[in-house]
Amino acid sequence: MRSGWVLVLGFALVLAFLNVNVMGYAPALDTVLISQSPYPVQPGGNVNIEVEIQNNGYTEASDIVVEIVIKDPFRLLPGEEVKKTFVQIPGKGSVKTSYNLHVNESAITGDYEIKFNMYPSATPGVYTTGTISINVQGEAELILDSLETVPSKIEPGGLASLIVKIKNIGTGSANRLSLELNSSHDELIPVLAKGSAYIGDLVPDQIKTAELELSISTEAEHKTYTLTLTAEYRDENNTATEKEFSVGIPVTGSILLEIIKIEPNYNRNTLKIEVANKGTTEAKSLEAKLVIDNETIDIDYISSLKANKKTTFDFPLVLQGSGQLVMNYIGPGIENNQIAEDIVLNFEAPSTGNGVTMFVTAVIIIIIIYFLYRKFLRKKK
């Protein structure tokens, strides 16, 4: 009995030795990702992967079929083969191959596994599976979808709100997005906290709106000022990212001409008409034409009339009548403008004193005649 057990035990040890020996020296196939280009790949993009088929055993592997298992979000590009056959993979050796894949646009950020089934061409039903991992990461791409100012016409000395719409046309989210308006012009200054706005997360194909506020100096000129709008956010990898937009803010002004005084100058025989510009910008090449009772009296001219300033036009003296003061000028947009202000004249010339003089003269003549008459009577006596 004892010898029987010894034989059984010895036989088991031999089998175990043989099994270990076979396992150690038999082909052992696996897959390793050598490179991914680009890394990471964006949804909607193409990626090239280089894969190494490793034989970790000591025995050569012959006529090995490597079959890539494609599933969403990947697909093979045209010209690529699902199955590739390798005639020989030496023991403790490897072969390399590559694939070109397309990534679905709907893919979300993450690591995706791709499987490979490897088997001898003679026995396709018995295979070894290897896996690799491909990194997919969306990238945010922000654009300035629209910019609106309220009011639409920005004038010096006021406030303006900027209604900004930001759109993400990229493949990844812009997280914790905030906007900040910066100005290098003293005439346009963001209003404290209203010069920045927090938007939050902006996912692909989403639009969000922010409102910013500007103070416009009274010294602002009629032109378009360029400001910088900075978008700050965290990308899919939680990396701080910035993007700057240049925005044009057009500043214009209004011209409001009004007659504030009409006054005759009897000494100089002129009619003075005082005009004020109550607007917010300069009126250039200002021409004033006085028309009374459908007759042009005269035309006066000044080169410019600035905002909140006044000037006086001189015309030949007219005391009575109605008509208009027609003013032509060049506005801030180099456009020609005209405004007509109605005028009614009703003045009376002051007394010159001729009646008094004639009366005094008459009295003096009467007195002289009286004295001459008395002198004549004395001589007669």
Image (cartoon, rainbow, N blue to C red):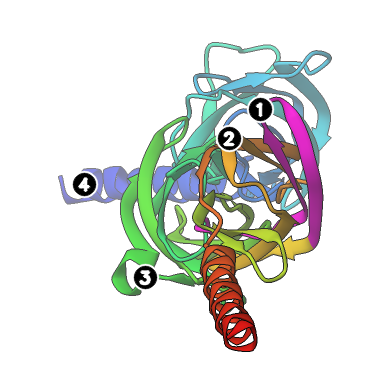
Q: Range of the magenta residues?
A: 277-302
* Label 4 vs label 2, nearer the camera: 2
Residue 49: image x %, image y %?
Answer: 71, 40
Residue labelled with disc 3: 191
Packing grade of label 3 (10 A; few <14, some 14-19, many >=20) is some
Residue labelled with disc 4: 5
Q: Quadrant of residue 203?
A: top left
Give the side of residue 365 with respect to residue 137, left or right.
Answer: right
Give amino acid for label 2: Gly
The answer to whether marks 1 and 2 mark residues whose Cβ atoms lie closer than 8 Å is yes
Q: Which mark is residue 293?
A: 1
The answer to whether marks 3 and 4 mark residues whose Cβ atoms lie closer than 8 Å is no
Residue 229: image x %, image y %?
Answer: 54, 60
* Label 3 vs label 4, nearer the camera: 3
Residue 228: image x %, image y %?
Answer: 59, 64
Name the image quarter holding the N terminus.
Answer: top left
Q: CA distance from mark 1 to mark 3?
A: 53 Å
Give the side of residue 102 with respect to residue 197, left or right.
Answer: right
Tell me which label, 1 or 4, sits earlier in the chain: 4
Element class at badge 2: strand
Q: Quadrant of residue 105?
A: top right
- State the residue lying farthest toward the front: 381
Give amino acid for label 1: Asp
Tell me which label, 1 or 3, sits earlier in the chain: 3
